[in-house]
Amino acid sequence: MKTISLDYSKARQFVGDATFAAMRDKAAEAQKSLEAGTCPGNDFLGWLHLPSSISDEDIKAIKAAAATLRAECDTIVVAGIGGSYLGARAVIEALSNTLANLIHDKENPTILFAGNNISEDYLSELTEYLKGRRFGVINISKSGTTTETALTFRLLKKQCEQQRGKDTARRVIVAVTDARKGAARLTADKEGYTSFVIPDNVGGRFSVLTPVGLLPIACAGFDIEELVDGARDIEKAAAAGVPFDENICLQYATVRNALYSEGKKIEILANFQPKLHYIAEWWKQLYGESEGKDHKGIFPASVDFTTDLHSMGQWIQQGERSIFETVISVEEVNHTLLFPHDDENLDGLNFLEGRRVDEVNKMAELGTLLAHVDGGVPNIRISMPKLTERYIGQVIYFFEKACGVSGNILGVNAFNQPGVEAYKKNMFALLGKPGYEKEGEAIRARLAK
Ligand code: PA5
């Protein structure tokens, strides 16, 4: 079986031999404590061997719920935020026709994402769009108390019941949430919705291979068995005991931390395929929320090339040399399109006539790599044979495992996110939530100064 590959030869030259060797040892230790379950945050390691522990029954249940939603809905709204949303969106957008939501093909429902903002305009326009449509909802929230998702679900539940009747609504609303606690669980049990459990020991950003990601992906018509098999490929290929030279997770964790220790504080994830935009969004959360702690951590940024070569390209080529670049490269695209002839040749591009558009893109990619390395930007390259469920599953698990190792190298708890609470506390105090009276008084006094 072919797998994704990693090339860090254009990053290695930016790191001294001693630094690299020391980091390699640290990575080996970090992987050991991760596998042994002795690292910080070890009560959230359920993702580590998740691919190999997903059973046929799990897949069957998810596919059955997806089949019901697909049969009864022309539109499915996936309500969730952060880890309860980005993985599903990343996979669906990577595999879908770029214009999927404009095509409205009869085979697949339109998949929309909501519950990931508090915009009155967004929600008004969404509910307006859903009027008259046979829509269903997947309500995803581990805590069941996230404001963005809870607000959206209130609106959608009411609208779905009004438009489709209570009985149908019960069939086309599915919950993915905690086994016991939270509003999403209570509502699901009270209404009798089909529901799936997010395991206690899997945090949001590591949950794409649970029903959090698998259900929406199956609803969109993609092969979740292949996705899980892809994750299993890398679970095996990066298992404990696999030597460094064969273990791409260890290599990536080592190189990025070695670069960080040499002052490269920002990692830019770049792609040359617009379908990968949300893979980068998912990756930013995975690494940002896992590593950005104790005033440490590489800042994860992303760009879509060649688009952003015309906006961020200048900064990357000649700005502060505190960055390194990780490129996800897709070897084979899905379509064939040749550069067309033009009789007038006013743009001077007839020399490209008859050549694949992808060849031009690949030369842009190679040219960019060489220019950025020459400009002092270390380059790591992740190569995917094709955009398929299998290879995307491999990419997902590759980044997850490397993230666990990398956070461990850094010495942080890679599996919590205490910093996310700070804004919520202020927001609830400002909004007068019961229980936040003292904080409300303090914040108002501060603002009045
Ligand atoms: O990774 C995380 O833990 C977060 O991004 C959460 O997934 C996000 O805040 C949503 O939380 P919940 O699923 O509890 O609604």
Image (cartoon, rainbow, N blue to C red):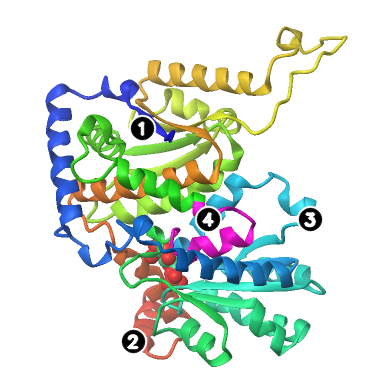
**Depth-wise, is mark 1 or mark 2 nearer the camera?**
1
How far apart, in angstroms, are the residues tagged by discs 1 and 2? 43 Å
Nearer to us in this view, 379 or 444: 379
Q: Secondary structure at mark 1?
A: strand
Q: Residues within 10 Å of mark 1 (few under 14, many from 20)?
A: many
Say whether mark 2 is within 8 Å of ligand 1: no
**Depth-wise, is mark 3 or mark 2 nearer the camera?**
3
Q: Which residue is mark 3?
A: 104
Residue drawn at the location 45% of the way across and 23% of the way down: 317
Q: Which badge, 1 or 4, is on the more N-terminal residue?
A: 4
- x%, y% of residue 350? 76, 9
Which range is magenta?
208-225
Q: Which badge, 3 or 1, is on the more N-terminal residue?
A: 3
Q: Which badge, 3 or 2, is on the more N-terminal residue?
A: 3
**Depth-wise, is mark 3 or mark 1 nearer the camera?**
3
Q: Quadrant of ligand 1?
A: bottom left
Residue drawn at the location 22% of the way across and 25% of the way down: 15
The prevailing secondary structure element of the residues shown in magenta is: helix
Amino acid carrying mark 4 in the image: Ile
Judged left or right of residue 115, residue 21 is: left
Q: Which badge, 1 or 2, is on the more N-terminal residue?
A: 1
Amino acid carrying mark 1 in the image: Ile
Q: Which residue is mark 4?
A: 224
Q: Which residue is mark 2?
A: 438
Amino acid carrying mark 3 in the image: His
Q: Secondary structure at mark 2?
A: helix
How far apart, in angstroms, are the residues tagged by discs 3 and 4? 22 Å
Q: Which badge, 3 or 4, is on the more N-terminal residue?
A: 3
The residue sitting at the right extreme is 343
Query: Residue 323 shows which numbered tag?
Result: 1
